[in-house]
Structure formats: structure tokens, C-alpha cells
Amino acid sequence: MTAITQPQVTGNIYSVDAAGPAGIITGPVKLGSAVLDMEAAYTEAAGRPNPDFIELAAGDISGMTLTPSIYKWSSGVTVPTDVTFSGCSNDVWILEIAGTFTVGNGVAIHLAGGAQAKNIFWQVAGANTIGTTAHFEENLLAKTSITIQTRISINGRLFAQTAVALEMNTVTEPE
């Protein structure tokens, strides 16, 4: 496993081998533990009973303001225009998506009323794509892969069971 530190990411990027950017090689135990923790968080988010909203806007949440709740979709979710999460600092949002998750180019996720990125969780079974120059404020738990296109800023965490592809992005761990 390689712990890779890059100027685009605050924190570490972990890989199963030393391929890619220069980094420090550490033992595989940390990566294995992280994968198990991610899978537990994914399962916890996916298993929430009694969602507050089911199939909201048929998966197109463009321009919406989302309040603290559990949201569930049996198919994909698209975000072609900005979305706002509005709530207090201790409020939690869980968004369960059985299909794909796509954020359009230039889309921004906004926080209002004290909402915090660390309390917003997207649990996605399908592929995830965040478009160029987008701004993302939350945690993404992916069963498959996450593709982050160029010049994106993310205040949150990206966890995938297969791969996270980054290119010229800024990822900051939320406080």
C-alpha cells in the first residue's frame, strides 16, 4: 500500500501498490481496515428504515433545497444545476441511491443555515460522476467507482469499493 500526499488533497490517498505518484509505502493493514470501515458505513447508510422521501423529483433534484432527512431512490440521481442543503450544524442527510449518481459540469452544492458537509452522506450503488468545475460538499460512499473530472473542489470525503479517479482536483476533509 502506498500513502500518497499531493497538493490537491488534504489528508492521504491510499493505493494498493506503489504505482502512480511518489509516496510512502506502508503496510496493507491500514488499507484493509479503511475498506472494512467504508463497507460498514455504506451498509449502515443503505439500511436506514423509513425514508422521509422516496423517489423525490424522479431523481432530478436540480435547484432544490434539501432539509435534513433520509432520501431514497430506486434508480439514478442527477444534479444538473445547483442544490442546497439547509439545516442546523448537527442535522444529518442520508441520500440512498440504487442507481448512478451524476453531478453536472459547473454545479455547486451549497450549505445553508449551519449545515455541515461532514453530516451529508450520499450512498450510491452505481457509478458516480462529478462534472468539471463542480463544487461538492458532502461524503460519497460508493459501491463501485467514483470519477471526478477536472478542476473540481470537494469539501468532503470520497470512499469507493473499487476506485476513485481524480484529475487536477482539490479535496479537503471537512472539519
Image (cartoon, grey):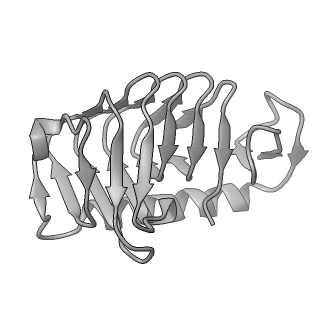
* Quadrant of the rendered image containing residue 129: top left
Task: Tell me which corner region of the image, top left, top right, bottom left or bottom right, holds residue 99.
Answer: top left
Above or below, 146 against 116 in this view is: above
> Whole-percent x and y of residue 43?
34, 62
Q: Position of residue 11 (x, y in %)?
A: 75, 54
Frontmost residue, 142 versus 121: 121
Q: Is residue 124 left or right of residue 90?
A: left
| Residue 169, position as x, y percentages in the image | 66, 31
* Residue shown at 47% from the left, 25% from the top: 106
- 30 or 100, nearer to the observer: 100
Image point (43%, 55%), residue name: 111
Residue 22 visible to the viewer: yes
Q: Residue furthest front?
A: 113
Q: Residue furthest bottom?
A: 90
Residue drawn 71% across the image and 41% down it: 15
> Would residue 53 be found to the left or right of residue 146 on screen?
left
Question: Could one spot residue 161 in this view of the protein?
Answer: no
